[in-house]
Amino acid sequence: MQQKLDLGCACRWGGTTGTVGEAPFGIPCNIKITDLPPLLFEVSSLENAFQIGGHPWHYIITPNKRKQKGVFHICALKDNCLAKNGIQEMDCCSLESDWIYFHPDASGRIIHVGPNQVKVLKLTEIENNSFQHQISEDFVILADRENNKNENVLTVTASGRVVKKSFNLLDDDPEQETFKIVDYEDELDLLSVVAVTQIDAEGKAHLDFHCNEYGTLLKSIPLVESWDVTYSHEVYFDRDLVLHIEQKPNRVFSCYVYQMVCNTAEEEETINRSC
């Protein structure tokens, strides 16, 4: 049976009348699917961690084993082959897990964020082998902190003897500068990084703007408000506006808005330096 249908017109089909293209009638169809379509792709990953991107298409997973948490595999979509240097594991000890995702600038790069560093990785062809790709570092953004992870504590025993104890600090220890948020602004082609340091009972944060191509620090803006690491925070950056939303207990929200303005004198000084 064949019948000509026009969108938006009334139609009678299968004993019911409705408008073609509108719910719940939709577009009448007498095709019945009896078998499952062929499986095109299947992969197992821990905690539904799966991302796809890059040029050509690659995907990122965590192997489906608990002991593999924090380990990321970057594989080709067409044949599931692991890229060279495609196993990425950040050398850090922290309470919060690091995270990885394809760069939203459509460059095919990958951003891997940890508490004390942001790695931007690139996906390139292996020389003399166009069928396999490799992962290499494009640039790295490091937190401003001391290299020594050991903290020494002096204690005095009952006999008056001084004992020095050493212990390792976590990479996301609140007293050290820690990266919390990484975002990309497409119109300005900038990477924005929020770094937080707990000073006494109060946390202070600053928003850094980095060149998206080379990772060079271009501007650092200190946030006036304190940053409590126990609260939920979101920071949005769109052209000349920065929006910081803080969720406090009892569903109380605070919103802080910053607007960037062009400093003509500073811009002229920058131009003179570059000339």
Image (cartoon, rainbow, N blue to C red):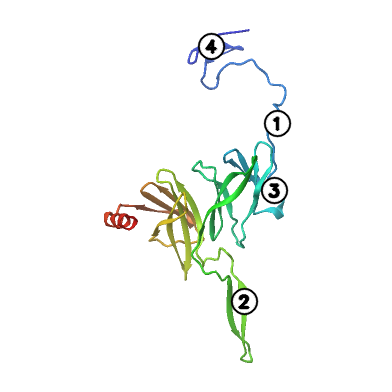
Nearer the observer, disc 3 or disc 4?
A: 3
- Expressed as whole percent of the image width and height from the top left, the position of residue 99 reads 58, 52
User: What residue does disc 1 label?
Assistant: 39
> Disc 3, disc 4: CB below 8 Å?
no
Residue 196 lies left or right of residue 133; in this view the side is left
Mark with earlier residue (2, 4): 4
> Disc 1, disc 4: CB below 8 Å?
no
Residue 1, by quadrant, is top right
* Residue located farthest toward the front when viewing the structure as drawn: 128
Mark with earlier residue (2, 1): 1
Q: What residue type is labelled 1?
A: Leu
Q: What residue type is labelled 4?
A: Leu
Mark with earlier residue (3, 4): 4
User: Which secondary structure lies at badge 1?
Assistant: loop
**23 and 135: which is toward the camera:** 135
User: What residue does disc 3 label?
Assistant: 63
* Residue located farthest toward the bottom when viewing the structure as drawn: 159
> Disc 3, disc 1: CB below 8 Å?
no
Mark with earlier residue (3, 1): 1
Q: Distance between the residues labelled 3 and 1?
A: 21 Å
Mark with earlier residue (1, 4): 4
Q: How far apart are marks 2 and 1 (CA)?
A: 55 Å
Residue 265 lies left or right of residue 75; in this view the side is left
Q: Tag on residue 172? A: none
User: What residue does disc 4 label?
Assistant: 5
- Expressed as whole percent of the image width and height from the top left, the position of residue 13 reads 59, 12
